[in-house]
Amino acid sequence: MADFPFDIVAFDLDGTLLETHRDLGTAVNHALTLGGFATVPIGTASDLIGGGAKIMLARAIDAQGGIEEGRFRELYKAMLAYYGKHYADHTQPYPGAIEALDALAAKGVRLAVVTNKFESFARGILDALDLSDRFDCVIGGDTLGKGKSKPAPDPLWAAQEQCGGGRMAFVGDSSYDTGAARAANVPVIAAAYGYCDKPAHELDADAVIDSFAGLIPALETL
């Protein structure tokens, strides 16, 4: 409604809108097995998430001594190929996410996804979960070209423009998200339930939520 403080709310994907660690972890383990490395427990795969798939795989391999660059590229391509076939096997929205999106839409708020995941993967997952129609735009880590993914401000500015302009807030779970928001001069909420790369209260966010139930009340205080 007219008194709601934001025209646009943008969301990170992994660890913010969607619980994705099982599918991401399985893809990482596929590449690790091909490379002769030990697999990571799926339950701890969330510790690797943040910054995109390449960084996720690099963290897993570096923790086991690293690998030469050419072989890493081969394993990375294998991981992407596997993930492209299995990115929605277990991935689901977090509890309360759909209800929060509905409530924001009912207030006339335009919605966006800003992720460091490849745009094609992000769109594929949203399609698989029947969520695509809820968003006015989807900005991926490769959408704007090299050097213009989070924590750069460019993807947030692009989302704001594609959603028609107006006051925007961002919701994310990592320092990539809060860094992008600060650089873009956009208010940001940290999702403490997500894959935070540091304690949520240390992410330099304007507010912290423990679940989607707290999202709209938090937005109304910004």
Image (cartoon, rainbow, N blue to C red):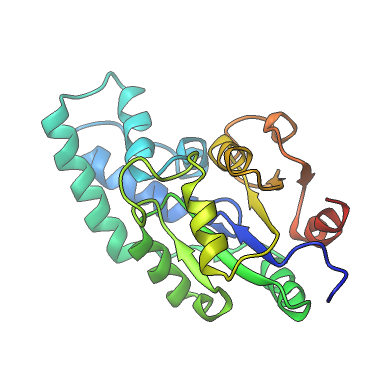
> In this view of the protein, which residue sits in the foreground, 76 or 52?
52
Residue 59 position, x and y percent, is: 37, 30
Image quarter of residue 81: bottom left
In the rendered view, tell whether residue 131 sits above or below residue 61.
below
**121 in relation to 184, above or below:** below
In the figure, is residue 123 to the left or right of 5? Answer: left
Count the marks.
0
What is the quadrant of the N terminus in the image? bottom right
Direction from residue 222 to residue 176 in the image, left or right: left
Q: Position of residue 161 (x, y in %)?
A: 53, 63
- Asked if one can make out residue 10 in the rendered structure from this viewpoint, the answer is yes
Residue at screen point 53% across, 38% down: 176
Place of residue 29 in the rendered image (x, y in percent of width and height, measured from the top left): 32, 43
* Whether residue 35 can be seen here: no
The residue lying at 52 percent from left, 61 percent from top is 159
Q: Position of residue 76 (x, y in %)?
A: 23, 43
- Look at 47% across and 48% down and name the residue there: 154
Q: Residue furthest left?
A: 70
Q: Is residue 174 left or right of residue 56?
A: right
Above or below for 118 versus 55 = below
What residue appears at the point 26 percent right and 49 percent down from the top-left corner? 79
- For this rendering, which residue is in front, 19 or 98? 98
